[in-house]
Every structure is written in C-alpha cells, then in structure tokens.
Image: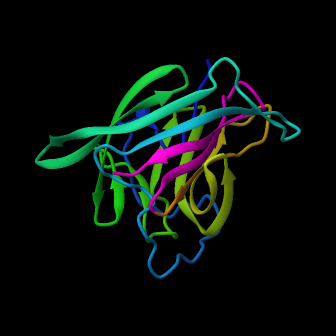
Amino acid sequence: MKHYFPLAICILMLSVSCKKDNVQPAPAATSPANVANGYPLTIGSYWIYENTDIDTNNVETINVSNPSDSCYISGDTVFAGKTYMVFVGMIGNENAVFFRRDSSGFIVDPAGSIYYSKTDFTNTLRTWSVPGYLEGYFKMVGPATTVSVPAGTYQTYDYQGMIVFASGYPWDNPRYVHSYYANGVGLVRETSFFTASPNYIARRLLRYHIQ
C-alpha cells in the first residue's frame, strides 16, 4: 500500500484529531515577534506549481507524467456557523476540494486540524497516525529559510512534518516533509514522499496571483 504525504494540502486527514501536545518533531525555535500571513485566504487567489521527483542523490527533475498542479480559492462556505475559504486544487492526479479559515492566527480545517500558524513555533500543531505503521507530528519551524523556485526567491517559514514509522521500515526513520510558506504569497515549495520509495517528490511555485 502506498501512502502520499502532501504538506500543505493534507485533505485525506480531515477526520484525524488535532492537538497541541508535548511531542516535538524538532528542537523548538523562536519565532519572529510578528510573522505576517503566509497563508492568504482571499477569493480569486491562485497558485500554479511544477511537480518534481527527487532521487536518493538529491537530484531533482520534472515529473514528466504530471508536470504541474494548480490550486485556487473559489469562494467560501459555512460549517457550524464559521466561514471557511473553499480551495480547489490537485493532489497528484486527483482533484481535491478542501476548506481553511484563520482562527486567531492558526489556519484550520473544519475538523480543527492546524495547517499553519503565524506565531506558534514551539508546539506540535497537528498529529495523526496509521495505527501500527506510522505516526506524524507537524509544527512550524523557524527561523526564516530562503527558498528559490521558478516564481522567484522568497523568505519562507516551514510547516514541517516528522513521520515516524514502526520498526523494520527500510529507509530513513523518521522521514521529514516540508511546506514552505512566504508572507503574502502562500505555499512556495513542498516536499513529500511515497512510503514505498526512498525518493521524494516536490512541488515548486511557477506563478501565482493574490486577490
């Protein structure tokens, strides 16, 4: 069985509970005094990404079978009295729709899972698991990291996931996934993987528009 771990758009995990706990996937880092919004939530904004494959020698090449993905905010909707932005996008070759809102500086989905924070660079923000196989821990990591993609070079903040597998997993354990967000831009780059392969996959921003 293959598992795919998209960092910015973890749609298949809406039912997994989210909690702040004491599990730390990396040493705590001090956040800037005031991190601007790296997760725009405006209707009409869109992002277009180039998909790549990264081999075990860290050589990155364009994925010729699925060279690009796109995502845009089509409108808003209400769940339990709260308004969420409707994101329409792609994960691999599958269409996806997901929902986000800003809850006091935390970007959350209708289940309460946290996908970004403006200011909390200390706590684990989201956890999930495949019982008996893996556990995932996600948090914001600072300081800012410079990331270059086809759309330009940006100062970004990393929403990092640490994926811990049960004993016997044949490759690195734990493995890390990353979603890099730039202030006023959104997701600039993300890296992920299929659990059945030692290689990684990535998306890097080609162009975007913030409404």
User: Is 146 on the left-hand or right-hand side of 117?
Assistant: right
- Specify the quadrant of the image occupied by residue 17: top left
The residue at the point 43 percent across, 36 percent down is 71
Depth check: give the residue in front, 60 or 7: 60
Q: How many marks?
A: 0
The magenta stretch spans which residues? 184-211
Q: Nearer the viewer, residue 4 or 76?
A: 76
Residue lying farthest bottom? 33
Q: Residue at the right extreme?
A: 57
Residue 188 percent coordinates (x, y): 57, 50
Q: Is residue 126 magenta?
A: no
* Residue sitting farthest toward the left: 81
Check if residue 190 falls in the magenta segment. yes
Q: Position of residue 157 (x, y in %)?
A: 56, 62
- Residue found 28% across the figure and 45% down from its top: 43
Q: Is residue 116 above or below residue 173?
A: below
Colour mode? rainbow
Tell me if residue 95 comes above or below residue 149 in the rendering: above
Where residue 37 sits in the image (x, y, percent)?
41, 64
> Residue 126 location in percent, x, y?
45, 51
User: Magenta-highlighted stretch: main secondary structure?
Assistant: strand
Quarter the N terminus occupies: top right
Q: Residue at x 75, y 27 (%)?
A: 197
The front one of 118 and 64 is: 64
In the rendered view, tell whether residue 31 sits above or below residue 2: below
202 on left or right of 54: left
The residue sitting at 10% across, 48% down in the picture is 81
